[in-house]
Image: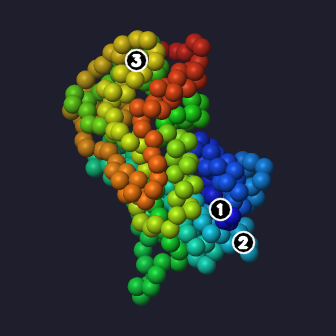
Amino acid sequence: MKRILVIGGSRYFGKHLVHGLLEAGHQVFVLNRGSTAPPPGALHLVADRDDAPGLAAALGPHTFDAVVDQVCYTPRQAAVARRVFAGRTARYVMTSTMEVYDPAPPTAEARAYADGKRRAEAVLARPAPGGTAAPFAFAAVRTAHVLGGGREEFTGRLAHYVERIGAGEPVAVHGAPYATSFVHHREIARFLHWAAEQEFTGAVDAASHGSLDVLGLCDAVAARVGRSARLRVVAPGEPASPFSYDRAYALDNSRAAGLGFPFERVADWLPQAVAEAQAAMPSSSSTPSA
């Protein structure tokens, strides 16, 4: 049994992570601002992670074998965590994102998100002054695009395809789209659970086997909704639908697989993920937006 703290963990795959850790017999702590209580069996710690003194007070005398940080978005948050958790945890796992690799984020918001994650990783990974070891073993889990879960999937990106294709509305795509990487929401929860128990350090990509381009995604959705996808090819520089990329943008999961994690295949779980998104759609919805 390990003592594991999850920062965040109140929605989507974070909830599955907490449940999985509890079912495995670990002593689980969940830290958030207090808006959502953890499931029975987990100890609830309430703090604003941006407030270093308040965070330290909430942690009190607790120490951990591992921390899984689901909600570290900025270098400032990483600096607070590095300072407060020094001497309190042996291992620190940050949930990062494949967006750190994106060579051309399409919006200012996307650029800020990717840059924040990159810089947060750097803060947590850097050696201590004088070249001594960092305060804890650090791993960054760069997650693929997460799908599945129906209403739990709060970004609405898969729902975009189900809605538009089901309504016969055109889907905006690039003329020669590149493939990208995906991971199932329960699979990434299992991966983070596994990562908390391991000893590897550094960045690792977490993606199901088998990349997929937007045309393949449209085919999978069309097969489920029973209607052919109508495609609208966008001009260069024009915004396209989620997961349509005009640049190479896929992950390499070979390091994680070599370390022993058994990834699933996108083709095996995608039909069910589409079915869940379809079941979550309102019985009567307004005309989809372009």
The residue labelled by disc 3 is: 222
Q: Secondary structure at mark 2?
A: loop
For residue 50, say whether it is visible: no
Q: Residue at x 52, y 15 (%)?
A: 286
Q: Secondary structure at mark 3?
A: helix
Choose top left, top right, bottom left or bottom right for residue 53: bottom right
How far separated are the C-alphas under marks 3 and 2?
A: 51 Å
Q: Are marks 1 and 3 in contact (CB under 8 Å)?
A: no
Choose top left, top right, bottom left or bottom right for residue 69: bottom right
Q: Residues within 10 Å of mark 1 (few under 14, many from 20)?
A: many
Q: Are marks 2 and 1 in contact (CB under 8 Å)?
A: yes
Q: Residue at x 78, y 49 (%)?
A: 40
Marking on residue 62:
2
- Point out the image quarter for the C terminus: top left
Looking at the image, residue 166 lies above or below residue 260: above
**What amino acid type should be assigned to the residue bearing mark 2?**
His
First-in-chain label (2 vs 1) = 1
Marking on residue 5:
1
For residue 17, say whether it is visible: yes
How far separated are the C-alphas under marks 1 and 3?
A: 41 Å
